[in-house]
Amino acid sequence: MKQTMSAKRLWAVLAALVCAAGVWLFAQRVLVPYQVADAAAQGRPRGGYLSDLYPRWLGARELLLRGRDPYSAEVTREIQAGYYGRALDPDRSGWQNYQQGFFYPVYVAFYLAPTIHLPFGMVQKGFFWMLLGLAIMTTPLWLRVLRWRASLWVQAIFVILTIGSVPFMEGLKLQQITLFVVPLLAVAMALLAVDWQIPAGVLLALTTIKPQLVWLVLLWLTMWTAADWRRRYRWATAFVISMVILCAASEWYLPHWIVRFWQALHEYHSYTGERPLMDELIGVLAGRAFELVALAVMAAVCWRERRHPANTGAFAFTLSLVLATTVLVVPSHGLYNQMLLVPALMIMLKERRMIWQRSVVNRVLSVITIALISWPWLWCFGLSVFSFILPPETVERGWAIPFWTAPQIPVGVAAAMLVYAGQRTFAASGEATTS
């Protein structure tokens, strides 16, 4: 019996390794060659660093060393010269006007301050390995936050699948700061779970360099704190003090930076045309209606679970639901944002039997979600195998197939979580009424 279990575990780990290898082989042998060939055919510049960290790093360097406004048109042109290899024409549309400006709160410059005297090539390599290390560390942290004492082989599978997922691959290739914010959030939640509230509050303030990713979490924590202020105020106090320090220091370096930041965000959305995920999938009106329903269900669950301590399963479930809802309503739908779905997927796997037995709707949503998530791994593996057999131009024609289910994955995960959360809340209300 033990030998059978060991064999099953070994096959599970090997399957995870195959999935991860397929994603990275697909990236190297199919996706990147296609992007290079397509850029050459369309006349798109691919010189320079092509790293999402570069605009932030150069803006930080110019602000801290030379006192220049990182949001200014002059600095933006310098960013473009390093990112693309040349500045872009501001009068052209589409990718030709994808400006690659600073577009972050000024205090992101303080995070990058230790690197501004280094050549960016060195910074880029260091950031790559740091993001990879943080991802490996974050997976066991989420398990602790979720109160799941998983065995080492289960943890190994989660780590392999996380760093071998398409969202992580894309984020790491782009060097997206989202992959830095998500680990900070995981550490903050783990600290909150062991009642280290002050460092948790400081780290939560640091996550606001990507405010669109954490605003729902902060709203949930505000509601949670108000339910037991005497025991929970310390994280909120540390958060507010940290935010005051960050904003005041930013104001010292760049007066009226908040106005400049909002102007930059407006310009970013005007030329990228990015919209929330549901707006893209089903239109603005239907998308907003769906988002409102999701937010209403989420708010009801948050209100119901607000009294539970941070070291309970109810708190962890609510946090996972909030993060899954965030991916639905965030005003951009970059694949790397789906790293916020990891806790929800862990919860669904942990409570899979209960979810499956709850109702037919749960079973249908579970099957759909599994299919949506499996699709990229299957096709990445298939295309990577074909890349060793077929001509490159033939395989590269299928580069988009692994991404076909990408927009639907957050919808499937969030829908499954919202339905299950509603059932839990309704059942808890029924038990309270009966008693």
Image: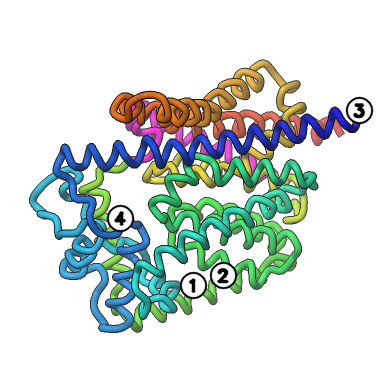
Residue carrying label 1: 243
Colour convention: rainbow
The reply to whether residue 392 is visible in this rendering is yes
Query: Which of 49 and 66 lies nearest the eye of the viewer?
Result: 49
Q: Are marks 1 and 2 in contact (CB under 8 Å)?
A: yes
For the residues bearing labels 3 and 1, Cβ distance under 8 angstroms: no
- Counting the numbered discs, the total is 4
What is the three-letter code of the residue carrying label 1? Answer: Met
From this view, report whether residue 138 is shown above or below residue 235: above
Secondary structure predominantly adopted by residues drawn in magenta: helix
Looking at the rendering, in which quadrant would you find the C terminus? top right
**Which residue lies at the image location 69% right of the left edge and 29% below the top edge?**
423
Residue pointed to by mark 4: 50
CA gap between label 2 and label 4 equals 34 Å
- Locate residue 3, reporting x and y percent: 87, 31
User: What span is colored magenta in the figure?
Assistant: 275-304
The 10 Å Cα crowd at callout 2, few under 14, some 14 to 19, many 20 or more, is many
Determine the image quadrant of residue 425: top right
Queried whether the magenta region covers residue 293, the answer comes back as yes
Residue matched to label 2: 239
Q: Position of residue 77 (x, y in %)?
A: 17, 64
**First-in-chain label (3 vs 1):** 3
* Residue under label 3: 1
Residue 91 locus on image (x, y percent): 8, 51
